[in-house]
Image (cartoon, rainbow, N blue to C red):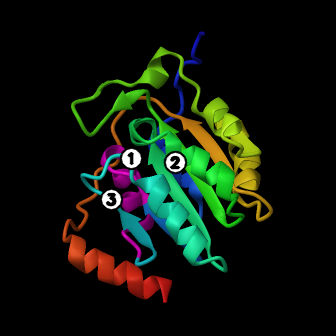
């Protein structure tokens, strides 16, 4: 199975797709995805950036969506993060939280562990896996011309949504984020309240 070449510049595509994050609870995976979200949000109170918890972004976002049904929850996962815990897509499909959207930023590499090629660089299609898990609103973004349609998928409130954003392997924008987990947890918890 041939994989389309990753052409999108993540420093342009991620902010363009995500837009204004205020009014949402946002959970980000680690490594490059956390850097993307930190730079985009300037580490806003409603954004929780994971570190050292590969595979935890979707389960954490799902828990938030189920416990906070009146709030929109956005998860930003990386391809390696999502591959680490594919079963979480099945739980999202089974639970069908209407207030949960997932963006997978796929550069085809495991950024947290040494930049080895991930399975998506070998043709694994995470959008098809999300569809197979029962997530009806899905889309893959390969060009900036598709950003607006992808934003419409993420804005749906009648079903969980999944958007796969195919980006180039250039590094994320660097942002000096806080790694004080206790302080960030308390700030995020206050944002939920």
**Vertical placement of 24 versus 144: above or below?**
below
In this rendering, which labeled residue sits more in front, label 2 or label 3? Answer: 2
Q: Nearer the viewer, residue 140 or 62?
A: 62
Q: Which mark is residue 153?
A: none
The residue under the point 41% across, 88% down is 190
The residue under the point 52% across, 57% down is 75
Q: Quadrant of the N terminus?
A: top right
Image spot of residue 96 (x, y percent): 70, 58
Q: Where does label 1 land, which residue? A: 55
Image spot of residue 72 (x, y percent): 63, 71
The magenta stretch spans which residues?
A: 28-44
Q: Nearer the viewer, residue 184 or 130?
A: 130
Quick one: which residue is furthest to the left in this view? 180
Disc 3 is placed on an element classified as: loop
How many marks the image carries: the answer is 3
Taking 46 as reference, is 67 left or right?
Answer: right
Q: Where does label 3 land, which residue? A: 50
Residue 142 seen anywhere in this rendered image of the structure: no
Residue 108: quadrant of the picture: top left
Residue 47 magenta-highlighted: no
Residue 116: quadrant of the picture: top left
The residue under the point 56% across, 62% down is 74
Q: Where does label 2 land, which residue? A: 88
Disc 2 and disc 1 in contact, CB within 8 angstroms: yes
């Amino acid at each position: 199975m041939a994989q389309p070449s990753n052409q999108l510049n993540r420093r342009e595509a991620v902010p363009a797709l995500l837009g204004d994050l205020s009014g949402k609870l946002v959970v980000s995976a680690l490594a490059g995805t956390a850097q993307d979200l930190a730079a985009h949000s300037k580490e806003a109170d409603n954004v929780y950036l994971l570190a050292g918890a590969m595979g935890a972004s979707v389960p954490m976002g799902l828990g938030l969506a189920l416990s906070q049904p009146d709030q929109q929850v956005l998860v930003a996962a990386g391809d390696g993060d999502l591959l680490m815990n594919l079963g979480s897509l099945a739980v999202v499909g089974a639970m069908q939280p209407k207030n949960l959207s997932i963006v997978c930023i796929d550069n085809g590499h495991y950024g947290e562990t040494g930049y080895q090629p991930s399975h998506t660089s070998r043709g694994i299609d995470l959008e098809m896996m999300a569809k197979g898990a029962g997530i009806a609103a899905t889309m893959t973004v390969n060009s900036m011309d598709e950003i607006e349609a992808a934003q419409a998928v993420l804005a749906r409130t009648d079903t969980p949504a999944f958007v796969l954003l195919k980006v180039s392997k250039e590094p994320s924008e660097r942002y000096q984020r806080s790694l004080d987990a206790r302080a960030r947890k308390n700030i995020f918890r206050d944002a939920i309240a």
